[in-house]
Amino acid sequence: MRPIYIVRLDDAHPGQFSQRWDQIEHILDELNIKPIVAIIPENQDESIDYGGGCETAFWEKARQWRSKGWGIAVHGLHHLLRTGYYSVLPISDHSEFSGKPYDEQLSMLTKAVDILRSKGCTPEYFVAPAHGFDDQTLAALKRLDPPLIVSDSFGFRPYIKDDLKFLPQQLWRGRWFPFGVWTICLHPSTMTKADIARFTVFARRNLASFLTQHHRLNFQEQTTLDQFWSWTYEAIFRMKKRLTCRTAATEGRARPC
């Protein structure tokens, strides 16, 4: 039994750093890797806008991604993040959804999905900006027709919980594991040449384990083993985060924790 690696590309929108996205796309095409691409329907986050983007050209590119068999994810609505609200995952205190009423979240999700559908890019996945979502987000996702697969959470394989499908996202760079399904999250717009080279080396070395067809993902009801793995991974993540914060404080580097 070998591992399965899935690539997820975050923050796709007309103002992305197109040159770096093109580099990543060329590598994935060459290796026949089919990623999930997380598209922001109406980006209003200036911090990830690199300017000069053409709406028409971007959506044509997005339709090409879909025609190549790439998975399409809705990545929030505007990517406008707030802080200080509880999220299901302890990764970040930033969120576009957490803390908002159920009706507002459902309206945001419905609008986001409708925009992608109108552009010919019907999504299969949901990716919350900054991993920020709460119980109301999950409840709203169930109301969508059909419900989207949540590309997030801790675990070692896809699972079903409370009538929602979850595809865990655990990695931000290539790392070898002997088994399991592992989603590697990349942000092409901010990747350096070294980042791209490192990913390319990992992908070539482990090419037989990378996902090439999304319909082959197997979702099963969450088991006690899945819950234990999720709890263990979350505990390790929290411990590493605390250590990083303490180190930053000792060295006098500001870091929100």
Image (cartoon, helix red, strand yellow):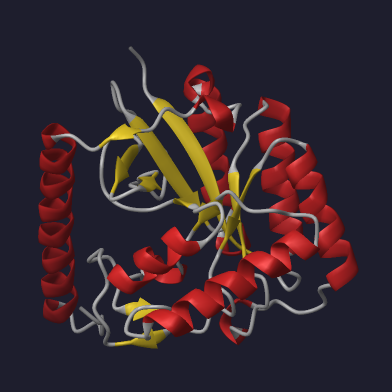
Which sits in the foreground, 37 or 220?
A: 220
Q: Position of residue 104 (x, y in %)?
A: 47, 84
| View extreme (top): residue | 1
Q: Is residue 194 visible?
A: no
Q: Is residue 202 above or below residue 230?
A: above
- At 67% from the left and 41% from the top, the residue drawn is 70
Which sits in the foreground, 96 or 52?
A: 96
Q: Position of residue 26 (x, y in %)?
A: 74, 40
Left or right relative to 90: residue 69 = right
Which sits in the foreground, 10 or 27?
A: 10
Q: Is residue 106 visible?
A: yes
Q: Position of residue 116 (x, y in %)?
A: 71, 63
Tell me the quarter of the picture where residue 141 sits. bottom left
- At 10% from the left and 59% from the top, the residue drawn is 239
- At 51% from the left and 27% from the top, the residue drawn is 210
Which sits in the foreground, 144 or 209?
A: 144
Query: Number of callouts in the render?
Result: 0
Tell me the quarter of the picture where residue 212 sits. top right
- At 44% from the left and 51% from the top, the residue drawn is 151
Q: Is residue 148 above or below residue 86?
A: above
Left or right relative to 49: residue 97 = left
| Quadrant that contains the C terminus | bottom left
| Quadrant that contains the N terminus | top left
Q: Position of residue 98 (x, y in %)?
A: 34, 79
